[in-house]
Amino acid sequence: MPVMIVVGVQWGDEGKGKIVDFLTERAKLVVRFQGGNNAGHTVIVEGRKTALKLIPSGILRPATRCLLAAGVVVDPQALFAEFDALGEVGIEVTPQRFGIAGEVTLVLPYHRAIDAEREAQLAAKKIGTTGKGIGPAYEDSVSRYAVRAADLFNPSHLEALISRNVELKNKYLKAVLNSETQFDAKELFDELCALAGRLKPYLANVSLEVNEACARNEYVMFEGAQGSLLDINHGTYPYVTSSHTVAGFACVSAGFGPRLTNLVVGICKAYATRVGSGPFPTEDLTEEGARMREVGREFGTVTGRPRRCGWFDVMAVRRAARLNGIDTLVITKLDVLSGFSQVKLGVSYELDGTPLQDLPVCADDIERLKVKYEELPGWNEDITAVRSFGELPKAAQEVLRRIEDAVQCRIGGFSVGPDREQTIIMDERIRSFAKV
């Protein structure tokens, strides 16, 4: 039962899509288990750039079927726009290649409006959401007000849901958020009915497909969005996403038992980035942080916002390794650190003079952390043509060894550029899955 879960172990944007794409040559199924179109990743294959938001990067492999599990929230218009964009680069998203769990919650126009109005009112204290309506959609799911994909095919039931929800959302927008935005229930109902025909062929029983694939001993990969430190429970609350980003949620979302999992792979950059608001202990506001942003092209796939940049945070990654039960790490963007005279690792925290073993629970405390850094010699060589650990400069090798030792988690691979071929896998367990 070769089942792999791939998660980010920082604040998102670690390069999960690139690594998933690299690993999916043998995968029968690639399953996205949380988030929505608020997360994005860019995959480059033979110089061709493909930006994906909802659809797993396994769609680039012709023999791989991609699925969205029940814990994902789906904006139908955004999904179809992604279909069309992939079609323009020669990738046809057919019902044979892609499926959606009937249980997924739909992101609707009133969710986007509520999201935007809330962020506007928070002003300087805003969470930093993408404004895509993801949080409000998850709220509806938990409060049992969601419109789910399967509801689109029961018109009378759908009409009643939309009528009730629009009435409630209009009241909330006007009375609580003081917004002039209002929605028409019939308009939205007609819009969803028009979309239903296109969506229906893609409905799938994700849990059944996953479990049957496992029974056939086929390769199955689960892909998360965002990063572990943005998990709604375990992240830097309240500056977190609205879903569970840790590996355990793959089982809940896709409906399979944890005993079926063989390998959990964590993806992290050789440095750290964060988009939007929230504490970031190792953020570097000097020219070195700006250089990471420029060389690493650190701008959001979904929003285009510049990412905050800083040094590798050992304590944060160690926490993520524990939360996910990570077996092996893949370090991305090692090439971005070429040319730095020194490479810094944030190896410990102190709060009000007291050493800590983990990130504090409260965001205000995280903001006040003092980080102790360890400085390692840098390297000047261009490493983008490196294809093995032994070809790396000795200083780069030492950085990877030190990260492995400090995080207390095996490093199973690294990447030295954005292309599929610039990923080097050393862990035999991953190599077996990826057929490399």
Image (spheres, rainbow, N blue to C red):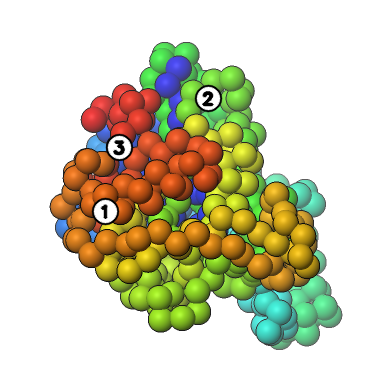
Q: Secondary structure at mark 2?
A: loop
Q: CA distance from mark 1 to mark 2?
A: 29 Å
Mark 1 or mark 3: name the one nearer the start of the chain: 1
Q: Nearer the viewer, residue 52 or 41?
A: 41
Residue 258 location in percent, x, y?
60, 25
Q: Residue at x 69, y 51 (%)?
A: 358
User: In this view of the protein, can residue 88 be seen by the observer?
Assistant: no
Q: Say which amino acid is labelled 1.
A: Val
Q: CA distance from mark 3 to mark 2?
A: 20 Å
Residue at 70% in and 62% down = 350
Secondary element under disc 1, as helix, strand or loop, is loop
Q: Closer to the N terminus: mark 1 or mark 2?
A: 2
Q: Position of residue 205 (x, y in %)?
A: 53, 30
Quarter that holds the C terminus: top left
SS label for mark 3 = strand
Give the residue type that dot 3 points to: Ile
In this view, the mark in front (3 or 2): 3
| Residue depicted at x 42% and y 55% | 269
Q: What residue sits right under mark 1 in the picture?
A: 416
The residue singled out by tag 2 in the image is 261
x and y percent of residue 327 in the render?
50, 32
Q: Position of residue 396 (x, y in %)?
A: 31, 52
Q: Are discs 1 and 3 less than 8 Å apart at CB?
A: no
Which kind of residue does numbered mark 2 sit on? Answer: Thr
The numbered dot on residue 425 is 3
Asked whether the beta carbons under mark 1 and mark 2 sit within 8 Å of each other, the answer is no
Q: How many marks?
A: 3
390 over 43 or under it: above or below = above
Q: Residue furthest right?
A: 175
| Residue 249 lies in quadrant | top right
In the image, residue 431 above or below residue 169:
above
Work out whether mark 3 precedes mark 2 in sequence or the reverse, and give the earlier one.
2
